Image (tube, rainbow, N blue to C red):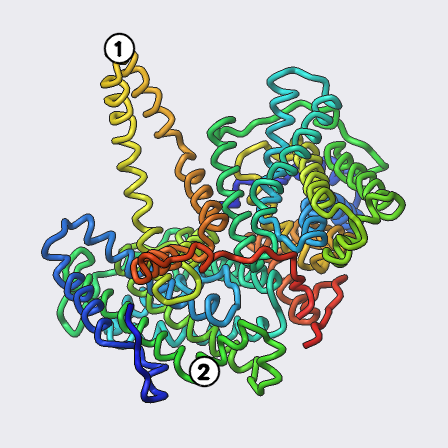
Amino acid sequence: MRFIFKTDYDQDIRILKHGGYWWSYGVLLALLIAAPFVIGSYLQSQMVFVFIYAIVGVALMILTGFTGQASLGHAAFLAIGAYTGAYLQSLGVPFVVYFPVAAILTGVVGAMVGFPALRLTGIYLVIATIAFAFIVEEIMARWESVTHGNEGMRVRTLDLLGVPLPRDGEAFYFLCLAVLVGSILLALNLLRSPTGRAFIAIRDSETAGKSMGIDLAAYKVKSFAISAAITGLAGVLFAHKMTFISPEMFTLLLSIEFIMVIIIGGAFGVHGAVFGAIFIVMVDPFLTTLKDDVPVAVANVARSFGMAQDAAGDLRDRLTAIASAAGLKGAIYGLIIMMFILFEPYGLYGRWLKVKLFFQLFPLYKRATFKRQKTYVKSERNR
Amino acid sequence: MFYGACVINRQETTKCSAAITVGTQGRRMLDFIQQLVSGIALGCVYGLIALGFVLIYKATEVVNFAQGDLMMLGGFFVFTFIGLLGLDYWLGFLFAVCGMAVFGMATERILVRPILGYPQFSIVMATIGLGYFLRSVAGMIWGTDDLKIETPFSTGVLKLGDLVLAYDKLSVIVATVILCGVLYTFFNYTRMGTAMRATSENMLAAYYMGIPVKRVVSLIWAISAAVAACAGVLLAPITFIHSNVGLALGLKAFPAAVLGGFGSIPGALVGGLIIGIIETLAGFYLPQGWKDVMPYIVLLAVLLIRPQGLFGVSMRKKV
């Protein structure tokens, strides 16, 4: 267990609290930089999706995790970023220009969504963002001169200052990694600034925050704008990764997936966004692998316990039929969400902290440290 | 779009038969009334689902995103009882409603009670997860084809002069009115209803007064699931029974509840009617594409002016 001897107020807000952080994050970064030369192309492609989801996760963490404003409309922000990038690219605008322009435009739209949000709280806000997302989706489908409607839009290879970055190449991987690291640093710096602390105050109690002199309107709009702008950046990368975008890619289900990123990751720290993104992106290939391997494995185990050859084969076929049923993925998805909320409300990052604390305090760890108090329902109707 | 699967558009046939006999002016009027009636029927369905949302929200402040999927499940139950087991319509109706009430109770016990008192958003996510789960499981059990059942209201029309009204739509409207009357009487004139209202006002105070809060909450979930089942059964002759129909309608019923002011029972019905009428009229008079968006535009506009919805009351916390 490490005790930090504080001699300076600045130590409280340092991003890297002590020397150990340099080592651990340095090693992590080195591993990520070395990764594309070691892992296969499929895994590298999945990693790029993890980065993109994590960027959106960081954005959503700023809005939902730290400002306490729920949003089920982030797929719409992603769509605006993606379409802005794709449209400007088709006009011949270089990447270094349309990348920030997409972020700015999405940020402006985000601020516009933020205005009605000033007066809405809780469930009303969720519905307002869903309504916004539906309207954006419909505009994408109807505004054919720009978005080509439901036919979708092809996106050409990303061209960074004359160097083409194909979507499967290492360079694109590094670009996404750089944007992710950049947005994480931005979020962390934001959180230790007065703005970030105002966000957290708004989350904890609007009334108390207001009485401390926080301008609720300005900070809520800011939070929406920043979150949307970062999502816009992710949108451009997403468009280039998919090479084809169409309105039905940006539905409510995608917004729910983004919310799941932060719920599963743990909605109280930027780490959570990354953990959640890894989980959400990797659960799909993992389930596919399970679908192929589990029936065979179960049949083998059954045979080793003395089951007849054809009975085991029969068992395997039956399990395969269950595993390849059409809706299984959705059911498992739903179960995962419910299980996380029931049993691990702090998400993967919370679990990580618990494991870490267990080893730090090794013989003295108390289960009660993270135990949640039972409480009666506190009304959120009065705010 | 994923919610495109639900089609509630049978007015074309009735529209044409009426159009021949009357002049342009009268026909326009007739068209309008025809659309209005389909809008009201659709609105009643939204209102019923919204009613389920509101009942649960009022009592426990849980927003049940899976309400539409409970309705879908009710439809599948009735299909099982009537279509597969060959029961009488009314008996099947009864069984489906009772089955869903038990299912609602079980949901409350297993999923909701352990997380009561946590931040609202995590409960919302839990019910979204439940919705995913129910949709997939229903698709796995009953298949993904469109199912249809024969009911006494499936065919036949009521003719009032030139106006032609289909029985299936009228049945929805009539049933909604009856159901609302029953619920109103229950909440205002019975002991249990009063206990439920007390619980929704203040759970802790109700507990101190000796109201069995846990049982009350269970019962509210049961009622809410039963109302959803009624909506599902009434809708079965109009739309097909399909595992995605719940999501599609739930997403429309949700704005209805918000529009009326989440937590107000008359508000849910009025909100449902408004959304249903706007959607149908927009589908008829406005260019294609407006039909799905118009309810949301109206919703945003209303929320801008009255953030607590039409019938909602805004409350302030004392610090």
Residue A60 x/y as whole percent: 43, 65
**Numbered circles on residues, count:** 2
Compare marks 2 and 1 and give the one earlier in the sequence.
2
Residue type indicated by callout 2:
Thr
Residue A271 x/y as whole percent: 34, 64
Task: In the displayed orientation, state which residue is furthest to the right.
Answer: B189
A103, B68: nearer the viewer: B68
Location of the N terminus of chain A by quadrant is: bottom left
B238, B88: nearer the viewer: B88
Residue A364 to residue A303: above or below: below
Q: Which mark is residue A155?
A: none
A192, B243: nearer the viewer: A192
Residue type indicated by callout 1:
Ala
Residue A203 x/y as whole percent: 53, 72
Task: In the displayed orientation, state which residue is furthest to the left.
Answer: A37
Q: Which residue is mark 1?
A: A308
Location of the C terminus of chain A by quadrant is: bottom right
Q: Quadrant of residue A215?
A: bottom right
Say whether residue A100 is left or right of residue A114.
Answer: left
Residue B304 x/y as whole percent: 65, 71
Say whether residue B26 is left or right of residue A25.
Answer: right
Q: Residue at x 53, y 71 (%)?
A: A113
Q: Residue at x 64, y 49 (%)?
A: B253
Q: Which mark is residue A195?
A: 2
